[in-house]
Image (cartoon, rainbow, N blue to C red):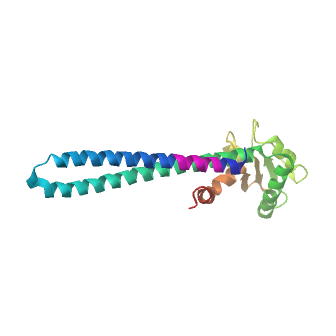
Amino acid sequence: MSLPDIVKRIQEEANLESERYMTDARVQIAKMKEASTRELKATMDDMEIKLAKEKRALWNMYISEGRRRSRNVILSAKEELIWETMSALRNRLRGIEGEELARRLVPLLDAANKVLGRNMTIYPVRGMDASALTGRGTVGTTIVGASELPPLLRRFHGRDLIGGFISVSLDGARVMDMTFQGILEKNEESIREVISRTLFEE
């Protein structure tokens, strides 16, 4: 299923979920209104004005509470959809291979070269990343499955980096995280904003 299809499905499910919660809220409000009306009818005449005021206050409270709960439910549903879309994006990046993978890695490699210089060492995340980077510089140990990594890279050991590479300058003093996971984390807020605008037109 393509990412646009996933986004469309998620948006449809969100709309259905939101409508269901709004319907439930309307039913609850209607029940509250009926209960309040029965109570008011049974009240003494000399309390009628006071009870009418209390009814209005109570009604406003129920409406306010219903809206608050509805907002919270919708916000929670939106957050879940954004998280699912981010997960789908991670899986999409994880599945890229061959020519498409090389097309995505070369601009990242150029960016790293500008900062660290062409004598840097490239540590690919996976074997397929190493293949896509072959002939484009000094390629070091593949991170996934490595029993030992240079001290500067040990913090990356065991992490789900999805794909990409890590660059280390010739003197070993500087490291650039060009892994797909690192890029997603660095740009998480802007990615979330794009997803939110796309899904919810916000």
Residue 42 placement (x, y as % from top left)? 15, 45
Residue 139 placement (x, y as % from top left)? 85, 48
Q: Indicate the quadrant containing the N terminus: top left, top right, bottom left or bottom right.
A: top right
The quadrant in which residue 118 appears is bottom right
- Which residue occupies the foreground of this view, 182 or 50? 50
Which stretch is magenta?
A: 8-16
Q: Looking at the image, which residue is at 68% across and 51% down?
A: 182
The quadrant in which residue 67 appears is bottom left
Q: Which residue lies furthest to the right in this view?
A: 135
- Which residue occupies the foreground of this view, 84 or 150? 84
Q: In this view, does 22 lie to the left or right of 114?
A: left
Q: Say whether residue 15 is magenta.
A: yes
Query: What predominant SS class does the magenta segment belong to?
Result: helix
Q: Looking at the image, which residue is at 63% across and 47% down?
A: 9
Q: In this view, does 180 lie to the left or right of 118?
A: left
- Which residue occupies the foreground of this view, 196 or 21? 21
Q: Say whether residue 1 is magenta.
A: no
Please say whether residue 55 is visible from this viewpoint.
yes
Decide: is 198 above or below 145: below
Question: How many numbered circles does the render carry?
Answer: 0
Q: Looking at the image, which residue is at 89% across and 49% down?
A: 134
Q: Indicate the quadrant containing the C terminus: top left, top right, bottom left or bottom right.
A: bottom right
Decide: is 108 above or below 77: below
